[in-house]
Image: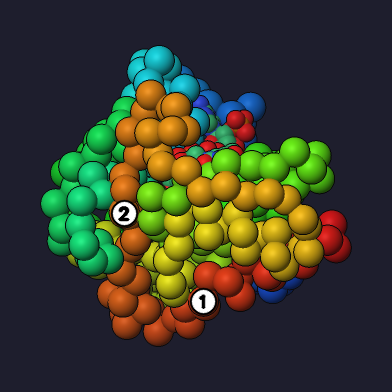
C-alpha cells in the first residue's frame, strides 16, 4: 500500500515517521509538509493528487493554534474545513481510504462523564468549530471508507507542546501558575501513531467499510495543573506550581472544562492496548532525555 501522511513537521506526523522507521514497514509511507502539499491552497491540493496516487491518506495537518485561530478565521477554516472537504472529495473519487484526526475541542465540556462518539458536539471556540466542520464534510462526502479519530491534549518530545513548555519554565526556576479547572486526558503522540499504524495494517482498511468516528485517549484524566506537577515530579524539578482557575489565566478563548474521551469503542473494535496516561508521560520524558 501507498500511505500518505500530511503534517510531517507536526508532532503527530513526526511520531508516525518515528514509529514507521522503528517497525520497518513493508508498505510505502510518504510524508508531506506545506511545501509539498499546502492545505490552504486548493490548486496545490488538486495538483498534488493529480501527480501522486495513494491507497490511504492519514490527515494529521491542521491549524492547531487555539488562541490565534480566533483572529485567523479564514486560514483556520481553509485548513481545517475546506481542505478536509477537498481531501474527502478526492479520496472518494479515487477510492482512497481516509483517516482524519480530530479533537476533544468539538465538545463544550459540560459532560459529567467521558464523551462517547454519539454525544452531540458543541464547540465553543473557532478551532473546535473548524474541526467539527471538517468532520461533518467527511461524513457527508464519504459515507464509506473514512475514519475520524478524535484525540485530546497531545504532547510529544517534539517542538512546542505543554510538556516541553513546562520543562522550559521549570528550568527558569521562577514558578508557574497552571489551570486546575480544565480536565482532560493528555495523550502521547507515539501512542496515537501506534494506533494509527495498527488501523492501517488492519483487515478493515483492505475492505470497504462504513465511515466511523472513534475516540482515542489514554486511560485516566487530570487537570493541566496535575499534568504539570507530574512532569516536575518525574523530572525531579523543583518549581513552585500554583493552581489557578481558568478565568485567572486570562485567555479570551473558551476551552472545554471537561473533555475526557471514552476510548472503549476503538479499543474493542481494533483490540488495541490503551496505556495509563502517567506511564506514557514517563515514556515521553525518557524520550526527551535520550533525544
Ligand atoms: N495538538 C493537540 O493537542 C491536539 C491535536 N489534535 C489534532 O491532531 C492532529 C495533529 O496535531 P499535532 O501534530 O499536534 O499538530 P501540529 O500543530 O504539531 O502539526 C500540525 C501540522 O499541520 C501543518 N499545517 C498547518 N497548516 C498547513 C497547511 N496550510 N498546509 C499543510 N500543512 C499545514 C503544520 O505545518 P507547519 O509545521 O509548517 O506549520 C504542522 O506541521 C491535528 O488534526 C489536530 O487538530 C487533536 C487533539 C489535540
Ligand atoms: C503554558 C501554560 C498553559 N496553561 C494552560 C493554558 C491551556 O488551558 C492549557 C494548555 O495549553 P495549550 O496552549 O497547550 O492549550 P491548547 O492549545 O488549548 O491545547 C489544545 O490544543 C488543541 C490543538 C487541541 O486539539 C486540544 O486537545 C488541546 O490539546 O494550559 C497554564 O495554565 N499555565 C501555563 O503556564
Camera-side residue: 48 or 84? 84
Would you say 175 lies left or right of 197 here?
right
Kindly state the secondary structure of the residue where label 1 is placed. loop
Would you say 137 lies left or right of 253 here?
left
Q: Picture coordinates of residue 219 (x, y %)? A: 44, 74
Would you say 149 lies left or right of 44 here?
left
Answer yes or no: is residue 24 visible: yes
> Reading the chain from its start, which is encountered first: label 2 or label 1?
2
- Residue at numbered disc 1: 276
> Residue 258: which numbered mark, if any?
2
Answer yes or no: is residue 134 visible: no
How many labels, in total?
Answer: 2
User: Circle 1: is it few (<14), some (14-19), or many (20+) Cα within 10 Å?
Assistant: some
Q: Picture coordinates of residue 104 (x, y %)? A: 34, 51
> Residue 154: which numbered mark, if any?
none
User: Circle 2: is it few (<14), some (14-19), or many (20+) Cα within 10 Å?
Assistant: many
Q: Quadrant of the C terminus?
A: bottom right
Check the image and report above or below for 259 versus 236: above
Camera-side residue: 82 or 142? 82
The residues bearing labels 2 and 1 have C-alpha atoms spaced at a distance of 18 Å
Q: Picture coordinates of residue 60 (x, y %)? A: 49, 46
- Going 72% across and 67% down the picture, which residue do you hit? 234
- Going 63% across and 27% down the picture, which residue do you hit? 35
Furthest toward the right, the residue is: 290
Q: Quadrant of residue 169?
A: top right
- Going 14% across and 52% down the picture, which residue do you hit? 120
- Going 80% across and 39% down the picture, which residue do you hit? 172
Amino acid at each position: 500500500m501507498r500511505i500518505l501522511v500530511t503534517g510531517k513537521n507536526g508532532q503527530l506526523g513526526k511520531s508516525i515517521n518515528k514509529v514507521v522507521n522503528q517497525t520497518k514497514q513493508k508498505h510505502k509511507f510518504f510524508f508531506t509538509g506545506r511545501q509539498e502539499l499546502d492545505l490552504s491552497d486548493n490548486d496545490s491540493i488538486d495538483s498534488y493528487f493529480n501527480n501522486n496516487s495513494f491507497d490511504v491518506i492519514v490527515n494529521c495537518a491542521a491549524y492547531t493554534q487555539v488562541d490565534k485561530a480566533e483572529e485567523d478565521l479564514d486560514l483556520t477554516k481553509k485548513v481545517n474545513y475546506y481542505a478536509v472537504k477537498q481531501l474527502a472529495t478526492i479520496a472518494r473519487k479515487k477510492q482512497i481510504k481516509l483517516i482524519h484526526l480530530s479533537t476533544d475541542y468539538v465538545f463544550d465540556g459540560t459532560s459529567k462523564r467521558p464523551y462517547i462518539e454519539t454525544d452531540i458536539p458543541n464547540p465553543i471556540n473557532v478551532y473546535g468549530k473548524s474541526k467539527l466542520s471538517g468532520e461533518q464534510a467527511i461524513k457527508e462526502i464519504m459515507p464509506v471508507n473514512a475514519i475520524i479519530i478524535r484525540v485530546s491534549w497531545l504532547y510529544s518530545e517534539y517542538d512546542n507542546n505543554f510538556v516541553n513548555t513546562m520543562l522550559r519554565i521549570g528550568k527558569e526556576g521562577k514558578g508557574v501558575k497552571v489551570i486546575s479547572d480544565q480536565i482532560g486526558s493528555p495523550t502521547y503522540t507515539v501512542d496515537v501513531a501506534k494506533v494509527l499504524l495498527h488501523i492501517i495494517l488492519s483487515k478493515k482498511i483492505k475492505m470497504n467499510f462504513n465511515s466511523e468516528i472513534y475516540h482515542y485517549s489514554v486511560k485516566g484524566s487530570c487537570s493541566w495543573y496535575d499534568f504539570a506537577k507530574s512532569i516536575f515530579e518525574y523530572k525531579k524539578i523543583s518549581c513552585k506550581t500554583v493552581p489557578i482557575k481558568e478565568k485567572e489565566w486570562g485567555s479570551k478563548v473558551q476551552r472545554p472544562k471537561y473533555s475526557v474521551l471514552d476510548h472503549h469503542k476503538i479499543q474493542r473494535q481494533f483490540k488495541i492496548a490503551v496505556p495509563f496516561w502517567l506511564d506514557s508521560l514517563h515514556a515521553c520524558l525518557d524520550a526527551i532525555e535520550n533525544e
